[in-house]
Amino acid sequence: MFMNITYPRRSLPRKISRKIFWYTLDVVTHTLAHYWRNAEQYVPVVEHVRVPIANLPVPLHGLTIAHLSDFHSGPHVHAESLRHAAQMTMALRPDLIALTGDFVHRSVDYAMSCADALSMLRAPLGVHVVLGNHDYWKNPKVVAAQLQRVGLAPMRNEARRLERDGAAFYLLGVDDVRHRHADLDKALRAVPNDALKILLVHEPDFADYTQHANIALQLSGHSHGGQIRLPRIGAPLLPSWGRKYSIGLKRTANGTWVYTTRGVGVAMPPVRINCPAEITLLTLGRLETGD
């Protein structure tokens, strides 16, 4: 277990108050979603993002990574929407595909249809998966089994050595942070210190606990970008572990790039305002002066 993580503690009255707040918000927003159906909120926007990496080996210049997260297969996000997102991803012809968790919402009964919808995903350097907190809230064994059935076995604190035109790099997959299963040190055990490392982890704010690992790029989801973003205010609601690096490309104090996608699906509230669903195509490039 990665032992140096500080998890927030809440008193019992505060927990009860939070449950009442979220239950009330759930009822209100589900009612809103019932009467305000906007099909466009479920159609992902493709975001093209360049990531400048210091000392990037020449064969890795131009490497493309398609990043999808937060599918939330359930009553509001149907398999048809996920199949469309998968088709859009395949049309991008990425070198590598990363899926960073939250495959189901409310019930593991949706795990099979979610896995089937994503089963078409293929890439020359593979499709790599980690689970999210919603997967753990329901049943991670069931979710993982369904993903594995279609060739998308989740990474559980492990590393995979990948190679392109003779240049090697390591993809790290860390298990869910909020359920205290994250163990980055375990994933790093067989990875050379000076290797180029890309980390997949559901919760973006985990980036502040990776300073010792020299991670070049972290890919995360979890926050959905807030789902609702107001002018001048931004996102009024963000989850724990998704507040500091809540959206887009940011850089930590030690130089790690963190990309947080807005996600494919919706959770609670089941609406998007000024925050469309997203498929990200990241391209690695040479670090230029001023980057």
Image (cartoon, rainbow, N blue to C red):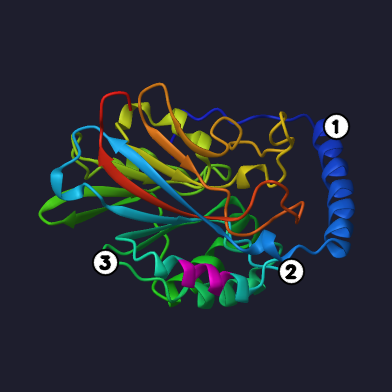
Q: Secondary structure at mark 3?
A: loop
Chain-order first, disc 3 or disc 1:
1
Going by the image, does 38 lie left or right of 89? right
The mark closer to the camera, 3 or 1, is 3
Name the amino acid, label 1: Pro
Name the amino acid, label 2: Pro
Residue 197 appears at what percent x and percent y? Answer: 28, 42
Which residue is denoted by mark 1 in the rendering?
Answer: 13
Q: Secondary structure at mark 2?
A: loop
The mark closer to the camera, 1 or 2, is 2
Whether 267 is drawn above or below 3: the answer is: below
Name the amino acid, label 3: Pro
Q: What range of the chain is rendered magenta? A: 82-88
Which residue is denoted by mark 3 in the rendering?
Answer: 124
Residue 171 appears at what percent x and percent y? Answer: 30, 50
Q: Is residue 173 magenta?
A: no
The mark total stands at 3
State which quadrant residue 109 falls in: bottom right
**Along the line of sight, the residue nearer the viewer: 269 or 2:** 269
Q: Quadrant of the C terminus?
A: top left
**Along the line of sight, the residue nearer the viewer: 200 or 136:** 200
Chain-order first, disc 1 or disc 2:
1
Residue 22 appears at what percent x and percent y? Answer: 82, 45
Which residue is denoted by mark 2 in the rendering?
Answer: 75
